[in-house]
Each structure stands twice: as structure tokens, then as C-alpha cells.
Image: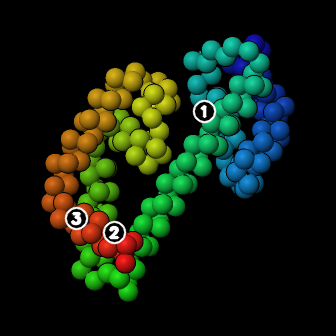
């Protein structure tokens, strides 16, 4: 493998492969700007972790694999965001929901946001990757360079803390779930 530890070698690598990787990501994502972000982000991670990399085989194949996985993760994340947006739109529909439920949903969102921000950094990162990006523990462990057991422990810790901090919102959740399912089946 060509040494990629210095600025000039990395610049050559970037210039050689950026265009084709961008085109590849664009085909997957069907969005030029997002493809650009994915490829640039991949190169940034590549540079930041260059001394930890142990690439077996051609660097080009490794780069394509990274762009592929980063693009898939982005699409998964978009799917989660879209589902959340659709759920929020459904539950916030003025024709179907009383104003008090809307206020409670806003309060729940604020409480959840606050509780997430109060988690220790590693717990929060693991929780968000698991719940919002829908990654498996093994995938999280690989991305964060942790053991699967550590990811499991961090997730358990995050859930325990969130249960305690969000205990007051159980009734709000029940109302939201009731309204959501009532509207689905009516």
C-alpha cells in the first residue's frame, strides 16, 4: 500500500479518486450535494484515522467500500428522520388531536432532548447511533472502535438514565401512542 501518511500522498489520493467516488455516491444517493458531503466526510475520516488504518488490498476498493457504507448509513438515517417527521405530522394534525396533546408532545420532545444532552458523551453517541441511525451493536462497535460488550453496557446505561429522567413523561407517551393508533385505525 502506498504511504498515505503525508500531506502530498493524501492529496494525490484525494485528487485521483474524488471524482469517481463522488459519481458513485451520487448514483446511490441521487443528490449531488449529499454525495459531495459523503465523499468529503469519508476522506476527512480517512485522514484523521490514517495511522490506525490497516488496509488489506487496493486502497481504491477500500475507499469505494467506505463511500458505500457511509451512503447506506446516510440513507438509513434519512429513513428514520422521514418516519419521525411523518409520525410528528400525524400526531400534530390539528383536526385529530386536542391542543393539550400538542403541548404535551412539545414538552416530551424538549424533555427527551434535554435528557439526551445530559447523558455522558459515549452513552449519548451509542444511544443515538442505535436508535436514530438504526445501527446494530456490532456496527456501532466497529465505527467507534469499541468492543460489542462496551456498546451493550453503554446502551444499558443510557436506557437506565433516560428511564429515570423521562419517568414524568410516561403519561404523555401513552396519550401520543393512543392518539396515533386511534387515527391509524379510524
Residue 61, x across and y down, in percent: 75, 25
Quarter of image, res 172: bottom left
Compare marks 1 and 2 and give the one earlier in the sequence: 1
Residue 118: mark: none
User: Of circles 1 and 2, which is in front?
Assistant: 2
- Count of labels in the image: 3
Residue 122, x across and y down, in percent: 35, 35
Q: CA distance from mark 3 to mark 1?
A: 41 Å
- Which of the two residues, 52 or 72, is positioned nearer the viewer here? 72
Secondary structure beneath dot 2 equals helix
Quarter of image, res 73: top right
Secondary structure beneath dot 3 equals helix
Q: Residue at x 35, y 82 (%)?
A: 96
Q: Which residue is mark 3?
A: 174
Horizontal arrangement in the rendering, residue 167 relative to residue 37 (left or right): left
Compare marks 2 and 3 and give the one earlier in the sequence: 3
Q: Which residue is mark 1?
A: 45
Q: CA distance from mark 1 to mark 2?
A: 42 Å
Q: Which residue is mark 2?
A: 181
**Relative vertical location of residue 40 with respect to residue 47 in this rendering, above or below:** below
Residue 46, x across and y down, in percent: 64, 29
- Label 2, residues with CA under 10 Å away: few <14, some 14-19, many ≥20: few
Q: Residue at x 47, y 39 (%)?
A: 135
Q: CA distance from mark 2 to mark 3?
A: 11 Å
Is any part of residue 44 visible from this angle? no
- Which of the two residues, 49 or 158, is positioned nearer the viewer here? 158
Compare marks 3 and 1 and give the one earlier in the sequence: 1
Secondary structure beneath dot 1 equals helix
Amino acid at each position: 500500500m502506498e504511504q498515505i501518511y503525508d500531506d502530498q500522498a493524501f492529496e494525490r489520493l484525494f485528487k485521483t479518486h474524488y471524482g469517481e467516488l463522488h459519481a458513485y455516491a451520487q448514483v446511490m444517493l441521487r443528490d449531488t450535494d449529499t454525495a459531495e458531503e459523503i465523499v468529503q466526510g469519508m476522506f476527512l475520516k480517512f485522514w484523521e484515522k490514517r495511522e490506525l488504518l490497516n488496509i488489506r488490498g487496493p486502497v481504491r476498493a477500500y475507499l469505494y467500500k467506505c463511500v458505500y457504507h457511509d451512503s447506506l448509513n446516510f440513507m438509513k438515517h434519512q429513513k428514520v428522520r422521514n418516519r419521525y417527521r411523518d409520525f410528528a405530522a400525524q400526531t400534530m394534525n390539528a383536526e385529530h388531536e386536542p391542543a393539550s396533546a400538542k403541548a404535551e408532545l412539545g414538552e416530551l420532545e424538549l424533555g427527551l432532548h434535554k435528557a439526551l444532552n445530559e447523558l455522558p458523551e459515549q452513552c449519548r453517541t451509542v444511544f443515538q447511533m442505535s436508535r436514530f441511525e438504526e445501527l446494530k451493536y456490532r456496527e456501532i462497535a466497529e465505527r467507534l472502535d469499541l468492543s460489542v460488550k462496551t456498546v451493550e453496557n453503554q446502551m444499558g446505561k443510557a436506557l437506565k438514565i433516560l428511564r429515570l429522567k423521562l419517568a414524568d413523561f410516561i403519561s404523555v407517551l401513552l396519550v401520543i401512542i393512543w392518539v396515533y393508533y386511534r387515527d391509524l385505525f379510524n
